[in-house]
Amino acid sequence: MLCIFIDGGQLPLPVPLGYAHGAAAKVGQMHFLFQVRSECHFSNGTQRIRMLERHFFDRQELLYFDSDRGKFVAVAELGEPEVKRANQDKDVLRSEMADVDRFCRVSYEIVDPFFQARRVQPKVKITPTDNIESSPHNTLLICTVGSFFPAGIEIKWFRNGKEEPKVWTTDLIRNGDWTFHIEVMLETKPERGDVYTCQVEHASFEGPVTVKWEPQSDSARSKMWTGIVGIVLGLVFGATGLALYLKNKKGECGVPGGEGGLGVGLDWAPGSPLLLRQRLRRGFCSFSSPRRSLWVSQVEPQLLWRWSVV
């Protein structure tokens, strides 16, 4: 297990003068970062602990302390003077070695219950990919396993119950939310009746979990596409019919003094406010007559209109 702790404040070593003054001179002109990152590597619990204390300046690693070696090691030329000075100081070296117990071992006891108790089941799916450039007649089956914790996982491919040894596995990807993601790929030439199985074993499962995939025949694919095309055409014709229905429905609103608006003449009622007339022109029903054609609101039209049969 690896634990990383970043210290952006106190530094166990002074900043080398060579770049400290340069950084101070440019503090108002550019952004820079001096960072100390401590890594605790655990094997078999706390039976073996290795601590790395890494020093960075402006994205470049300068030096690190390795508890297995018991000394500082220079990574860049700029860090060599500090490494030489620190390795000659026995008090500094003793303090760094004491951090293995004082820092790493204590931190393990704090975070281990969280790691041991946390279980997130992986999500498993199979994605087939045709038209592979290297083998046009083959199919690449991708078993995607994502969003799981802890990182330990075992994934196998089976064809008709027999394990397939030739598979490709991606590196374990950290999602950034304490979960992981991985893909295992199998290149094969599916035949009718074959059953492919991706088997996943993880600490969050009581037993192995499997997801199956079977190749579709040409007739099954044609039926599927026929169904899809039929659904699309049905939606298109349905939308067209609905639009025509609503268009024809416009002039069929019942109003006082007329039948569905047909053969009805419309005049403004004397003294109708102009604002209300403008609002009525934005109404919901239209009426046509030899005299005029207007949009009319159905909200209390008798208060605003005088109706006369043409």
Image (cartoon, helix red, strand yellow):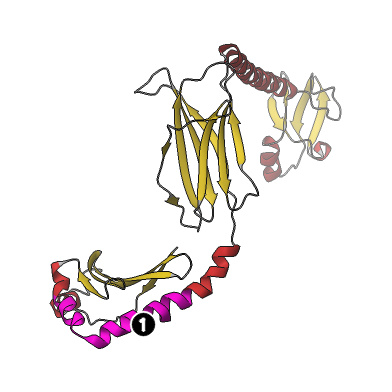
Residue that lies at the very extreme toward the top in this rendered image:
219
Residue 58 percent location from the top left of the image: 23, 67
Residue at point 46%, 45% (across, down) = 182
Residue 236 percent location from the top left of the image: 62, 20
Q: Which of 25 and 175 lies nearest the eye of the viewer?
A: 175
Residue at point 18%, 76% (across, down) = 83
| Magenta run includes residue 258 | no
Residue at point 85%, 22% (across, down) = 259
Residue 87 percent location from the top left of the image: 20, 80
In the image, residue 172 above or below residue 7: above
Q: Which of 306 and 220 lies nearest the eye of the viewer?
A: 220
Residue 139 percent location from the top left of the image: 46, 23
Rendered-image quadrant of the C terminus: top right
Left or right position of 304 against 51: right
- Tell me which corner region of the image, top left, top right, bottom left or bottom right, holds residue 126: top right
Circle 1 SS class: helix
Reading the image, the residue beneath label 1 is 98
In the image, residue 78 above or below residue 187: below
Left or right position of 137 against 253: left
Prevalent SS, magenta region: helix
The stretch in magenta equals 81-107
